[in-house]
Amino acid sequence: MQIIAAVLSLLASSAVLITPASAATGDHPAIVVVIDAFTDNVELCYTFQTLVRAKGFPEAPIIAFNSILLSQETVANLHTCTERDLTFVDVQLLHGEFPLDVNVLPDVSYEYAQTQRFLSTRMWDQPALDPYDVIMHISDATCLTFDDEYLPGFPDSPELDHQFDYKSYTVPNELQPTQHTEGIYELSINYLDFREMSEPNEPLWNNLKFEYNNNNKLSMFSTDFEIVRKSFMQDTAVRDYMEHLTENAVSSDLFFQRRWSAGTLRKMAVALFLKGFVVSDTHVAGVVEKDFLAGNLFRNICRIP
């Protein structure tokens, strides 16, 4: 996935250089990262350094939610990686809590699942986010390879008479393994029936429906880069749906044992509750995802000289 994303980024770069987008006015964005046991803090430092290329809101701060204890040395080192204001918020206690109906198995790590749960539901009520209306979520795998005039906010355009509410991307033709999506679509349909809601007739939802019916799999939005209008995730219906998948007596154990991804749940929520014209799901030119598994860190473009 990361390699394909990098290729798409570089191919799209020429178009952006010709017609650069400007930042949407009136937004107050923040950059968010979750630091857990899987985070490579050396690579996160390099990620922070590339944020100098996010020119749209140079004063937008970074908020780092840490689910593990960070040493003073690590905190100090990460502060040196960016000139942006950097705030650490300890969420270790949240990561130690489980919904009542989860069968917590011995000798099983739920660190990944807790991070996905935090990104899906629990993050959006954190007081640290109160001053901000737009959130750009990144990870240690994120890399900005050249200057962007609207990040970390949404792009503006004189042709548009509305704001964007969500921006991310899906790698074409990449579906998540069934074992990591089992139950999501079925429980979503059950939710619609229970709330007496009709399925949307939007391309994004229709594509997800096709993926499930033909492959018993689902695609996902990137878990390393997204821009979200906070009011969308705080909307009563969206919150109710997301908690139906992560906290509900029927679904919560599936969420933890099947390791559902926040990227998959986010794509389902966007497809169900947003109109297509407020969603941008094209790849963001200049954004590259490092491929940790293959050892490809794109040092030639993901390091600031």
Image (cartoon, grey):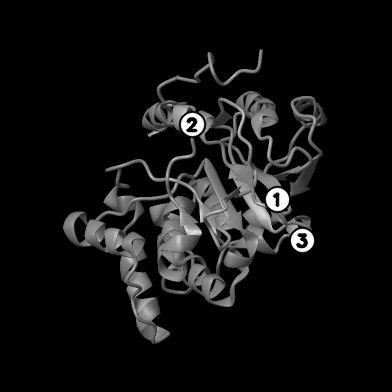
Label 3, label 2: how far apart the Cα atoms are? 28 Å
Amino acid of disc 1: Pro
Residue 127 visible from this viewpoint: yes
Q: Nearer the viewer, residue 208 or 52?
A: 52
Q: Nearer the viewer, mark 1 or mark 2?
A: 1
Q: Which of 12 and 294 is in front in this view?
A: 12
Residue 286 visible from this viewpoint: no
The residue that mark 2 highlights is 289
Residue at the extreme front:
158
> Are the residues tagged 1 and 2 within 8 Å (C-beta)?
no
Mark 3 or mark 2: name the one nearer the start of the chain: 3
The residue that mark 3 highlights is 130
- Residue at 32 percent across and 62 percent down: it is 203
Spot occupied by residue 3 in the image (x, y as percentages of width and height) = 39, 27
Which dot marks residue 29? 1
Amino acid of disc 3: Asp
Label 3, label 1: how far apart the Cα atoms are? 11 Å
Mark 3 Cα shell of 10 Å, populated few (<14), some (14-19), many (≥20): few
- Residue at 70 percent across and 50 percent down: it is 29
Q: What element carries label 3?
A: loop
In the image, is 281 to the left or to the right of 91? Answer: left
Spot occupied by residue 302 in the image (x, y as percentages of width and height) = 57, 21
- Residue at 39 percent across and 87 percent down: it is 196
Q: Nearer the viewer, residue 150 or 118?
A: 150
Mark 2 Cα shell of 10 Å, populated few (<14), some (14-19), many (≥20): many
Amino acid of disc 2: Glu
- Residue at 46 percent across and 44 percent down: it is 222
